[in-house]
Image: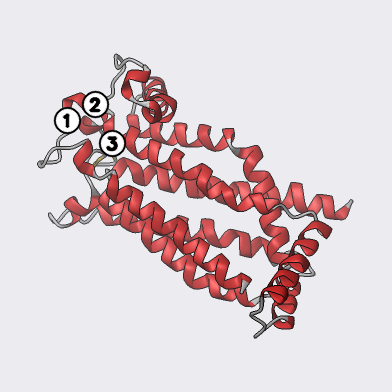
Amino acid sequence: MYLDQRTKKFLKVFALLAFVFVLTGCGQNLDSNGHLLADRAINASTPWSLDAGFFDFILTIPIAKGILFISDTLGNVAWGVVGMTIFINLLILPIMIKSTVSTQKMQMLQPEMEKIQRKYAGRKDQASQMRQSAEIQALYKKHDVSMMSSFTTFLTLPIMLAMWQGVQRIELLYDSTLFGLSLGLTPMSQITSGHWQYIVIVAIVGITQYLAIEINNIMLKRNPRYKVSKQQQSMKTMNIVMTVMIVWFALSMPTAMSLYWITTSIVTIIRTIYIQIYHIEKKREK
């Protein structure tokens, strides 16, 4: 069934995310005591060269240098992380507009999708599966829905990994604080040591992340043609799983990364509201 395939794809993407984070674990950049390795440190004098590796050259070093540049201007590496996150989100805004519009259209079509699925329920032969697929494709074509929209997850994944690497490797970070929080230490290590104030920033990560996921469903309800589909009901559990995963990452990474998650979530909420009003509702009115 199509719904099952989407669910499996969703799980695979986030399993891949977790797997990549494990593979690129803290041991690459930090020693056993949690100190930054000298040959992995990035500072203002670090050369921007292909010798560092393709991924570092394309994404990690430019992001880290951008954070340092903004930090010099605003006076704290924390604001460098926030500023660079906003800048990256502005860069990918045109892609995200197309993706969000297509996603909204797909969700509005879910009741019709479920009709097609019920029509072919229990029919596992190849001919029936091909006809079902053809009807789904025809439905998408009729409403100008792009299947490529789902691939934006793979666009944001390398950027997120580069941001994580860049933040963790900034030498200045390990001597910086914000509101009494050490940006280079992980919230997990500090909470287990009795520094309960780190719970606050992790809680903010969880709340903003969940709202960033749910905002699309909230905005969907503004459409008078909106009907809750079985898929949207099942996605509630997925949204909770996603939020828990992000909270776990926030606990396990330097506190500065929590600023990245929070900023990204806030930008996502604002972006979704903007797209809904100016790229969906106003076009529908016309």
137 to the left or right of 47: right
Q: Are marks 2 and 1 in contact (CB under 8 Å)?
A: yes
3D distance between C-alphas at marks 3 and 1: 11 Å
| Left/right of residue 34 with respect to residue 267 in the rendered view | left
Of labels 3 and 1, the one closer to you:
1
Nearest the viewer among 129 and 111 is: 129
Task: Name which residue type carries label 2.
Answer: Ala
The percent position of residue 32, horizontal first and vertical second, equals 10, 42
**Residue type, mark 1 in image:** Leu
Q: Tell me which residue sits at (31%, 17%) in the image.
A: 44
Label 3 residue SS: helix
User: Is residue 201 visible in this depiction of the protein?
Assistant: no
As measured in the structure, the alpha-carbon distance from the residue carrying label 2 to the one carrying label 1 is 6 Å
Instruction: Name the residue: 71% across, 69% down.
Output: 130
**Which secondary structure, mark 2?**
loop
Tell me the quarter of the image containing the N terminus: bottom right
Instruction: Name the foreground residue: 161 vs 207.
Output: 161
**Disc 1 residue crowd, few under 14, some 14–19, many 20+, Cα 10 Å:** some
**Residue pointed to by mark 2:** 41
Task: Tell me residue 207's x, y (percent).
Answer: 43, 59
Work out which residue is located at the far right of the displayed protein and give it: 286
Residue 31 lies, in percent from the top left, at 13, 38
Q: Earlier in the sequence, mark 3 or mark 1?
A: 1
Which amino acid type is shown beneath numbered disc 3?
Gln
Q: Where is residue 75 shown, x and y percent of the image? A: 35, 24
Work out how far the residue at label 3 is from the one at label 2, CA to CA, in angstroms.
9 Å
Label 2, residues with CA under 10 Å away: few <14, some 14-19, many ≥20: some
- According to the image, label 3 marks what residue? 168
Q: Residues within 10 Å of mark 3 (few under 14, many from 20)?
A: many
Q: Residue at x 74, y 82 (%)?
A: 119
Residue on which the image places disc 1: 37
